[in-house]
Image (cartoon, grey):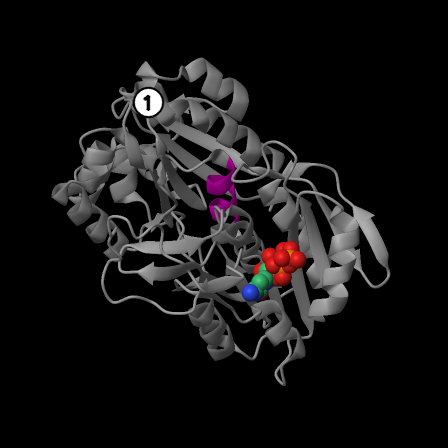
Amino acid sequence: MSKKRILLIIGGGIAAYKSLELIRLLRRSGLEVRTVLTPAGAQFVTPLSLSALSENPVHTDLFSLTDEAEMGHIQLSRSADLVVVAPATADLMARAANGLANDLASTVLLATDKPVLMAPAMNVRMWEHAATRRNLATLKADGVRMVGPDEGDMACGEFGPGRMAEPVAIHHAILDLLSDAPGPLSGKHALVTAGPTAEPIDPVRYLTNRSSGKQGFAIAAALSRLGAKVTLVSGPVALPTPAGVRRVDVETAAEMLAACQAALPADMAVCVAAVADWRPAEISDQKTKKVPGAGPPVLTLTENPDILATLSRGANRPTLVVGFAAETDHVETYAQGKLARKGCDWIVANDVSIEGTMGGDENAVSIVTAAGIERWERLAKSEVADQLAARMAESLK
Ligand code: CTP
């Protein structure tokens, strides 16, 4: 990838500071980075930081005599292998969707003949506004790829989708778009389950497990980056679908199992979902009401199918089946028990008593196989995913 070039356009949003980290990640992958800084972007980051990190001059002005003498805006737009807009503000997206060319950034976007990736970043109301929805649809129809936005607390104090994707996610999306060499998992099909399941009690209540889905989504993305065709069967989570991954949304364990079986055959399966072990034996059609004096209702539960065990023991068994075990104590002993009980090949044992792992961005895991236990240091969930995917590719060689 050493010869590939990225042209990074930095729009005017608070998320512009994250573009500094993005440049660092891109440079570490051996990519060359040139930057275009909009006047609004320059309110948030300085040309000096950008040129220091990218080790290239920063382009800011459509009518710059020096820039035009050294590299005209048309050449600038085409000298890159990929044009990335991060943050892509509502204004930049609107101008790009409508083909305006009233500053250097929009002119480059109109003049380029290269793929464009945008990382939208804006207030949640702006993101949800009908005008932005229209612009987004137009840009997608024009072939512009999107990464994010994420959902979360915003700089403006509101909550919702609109936060720019993290630099690591943008970096991954860039590598995906640049990779033309077939990966070690090309031609292989991977099935991944992720997130919780929700088991209805009545139309308004359900039983569920705590699970953000982050680890499962990261694994689906990592397997896809290695060239696998990935089917991600997900319970209810608030996460964007990783680039290139086929996603099937389900609610209950029974639906998750059916979706997994429908996706077979697969060369590998990774069951990361926190499947509810039980579901209410009966689902009420109507909301259960409080009856004065009657006390709390009794909920009778029935056992859910074990998806991991069913896939491991099924006629169409994937060659490599990996399960997860989230434990709070006796982590490795319980994981060894699960390996035998469920009939899978590996268990990724996960100590959720460690602060910051449950729902957070890091994980401390051990890989338990028939051959023994391998303890990994505490890593970002995306790194756990990359290392696990690499191990899986190695074992399926
Ligand atoms: N799993 C599954 N279907 C279920 C329950 C669990 O596919 N109905 C999978 C999970 O995706 C995970 C592994 O089994 O890969 C272990 O899940 P866990 O909930 O830790 O195991 P349990 O069977 O619930 O065991 P225990 O209650 O003893 O912890």
Magenta stretch, residue numbers: 168-175
- Quadrant location, ligand no. 1: bottom right
Res. 148 in view: yes
Residue 79: which quarter of the image? top left
Q: Quadrant of the C terminus?
A: bottom right
Q: Amino acid at mark 1?
A: Ala
Give the camera-side residue of 211 and 123: 211
Q: Considering the numbered disc 1 on the image, is that residue within a helix, a strand or a loop?
A: loop
Farthest residue to the right: give it. Answer: 371
Q: Is residue 14 above or below residue 137?
A: above
Residue 88 position, x and y percent, is 31, 35
Res. 184 in view: no
Residue at image coords 79%, 52%: 333
Give the camera-side residue of 115 and 206: 206
Residue 164: which quarter of the image? top left
Q: Is residue 165 above or below residue 305?
A: above
Residue 242 position, x and y percent, is 45, 53
Instruction: Name the residue tied to disc 1.
Output: 155
Horizontal side of residue 99 vs 201, given as left or right = left
Q: Is mark 1 within 8 Å of ligand 1?
A: no
